[in-house]
Image (cartoon, grey):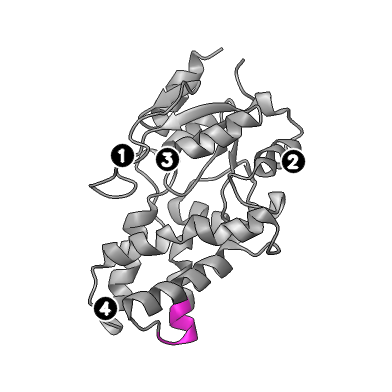
Amino acid sequence: MKPKALLFDVFGTVVDWRSGIIRDLTIHFKTYPCSHDPAVIADAWRAEYQPSMEPVRSGSRGYVDLDTLHGENLESIARQFEFELGTTSQKEWLVKAWHRLPCWPDSANGIESLKEQFICASQSNGHIALAVNLAKYNQFSWDVILGAEVVRTYKPAPESYIRACNALGLQPNECMMVAAHNTDLAAARAQGLQTAFIRRPNEHGPTQTIDLEPSDNWELKAESIIELSRLLDDYD
């Protein structure tokens, strides 16, 4: 069955978080030098991403947005790798690096093409302000943003997918999760969503070892969002 809505993971699937974070860390380190390569710091910062969301998913911490978590994680990484964050405004600028990540070359055109047939929704762990800023920065637009404020938790918590579908007035099987991460797709399928794998073999840099190929028989597999659009033309 052809889906009515496509729910897109954003970090890694639609935008290239690693190059954007490395870019802004490089700028920051011109003022506050660090003995470690910006790529090392970017990877360490990202490694704190899922663990920092777990207390919210488990209910041991109330919902806080991703800026809050990224700020806390950045402070931890700065202590660990012994670099200065500077003034409050300089730290905030670095946290907002996640609001100005570049998209993959196929993302903007791919989303625009898909919007002709499908509801295209940002289903990210990012909050609404972050998702809006990423869309403005990259000149792509969503039909709707189903960020963390909407579902009040973080993927891959089961309720994040169900609440997203409910927000659109659709059944899970009428929605397709689009992601470059097998774990995201597995969690979505467990709630009844259709799935599409977008291969992003450089998300984690040149030595990436995870998510190089689909780990299951997801309904669709594509090398880009533009290819996904073509595949969905023939999907039934």
Task: Please give the residue where the numbered disc 4 appears in the rendered image.
Answer: 34
**Residue at x-position 40% and y-position 28%:** 214
Labels 2 and 3: the sequence-earlier one: 3
Tell me the crowding category of disc 1: few under 14, some 14 to 19, or many 20 or more residues within 10 angstroms, Cα based: some
Tag nearer the camera, 2 or 1: 1
The kind of residue on which mark 1 rests is: Pro
Task: Please give the residue where the numbered disc 1 appears in the rendered image.
Answer: 201
What kind of element bears circle 4?
loop
Magenta stretch, main secondary structure, is helix
Q: Is residue 106 magenta?
A: no
Labels 4 and 3: the sequence-earlier one: 4
| Along the viewing direction, whichever of 57 and 87 lies nearer the viewer | 57
Report, in whole angstroms, how far the alpha carbon at label 2 lies from the one at label 1: 32 Å
Task: Please give the residue where the numbered disc 2 appears in the rendered image.
Answer: 167
Q: Residue 126: x and y, percent?
A: 56, 55
Left or right: 89 as drawn, with respect to 28: right
Labels 4 and 1: the sequence-earlier one: 4
The kind of residue on which mark 3 rests is: Ser
Report, in whole angstroms, how far the alpha carbon at label 3 lies from the one at label 1: 15 Å
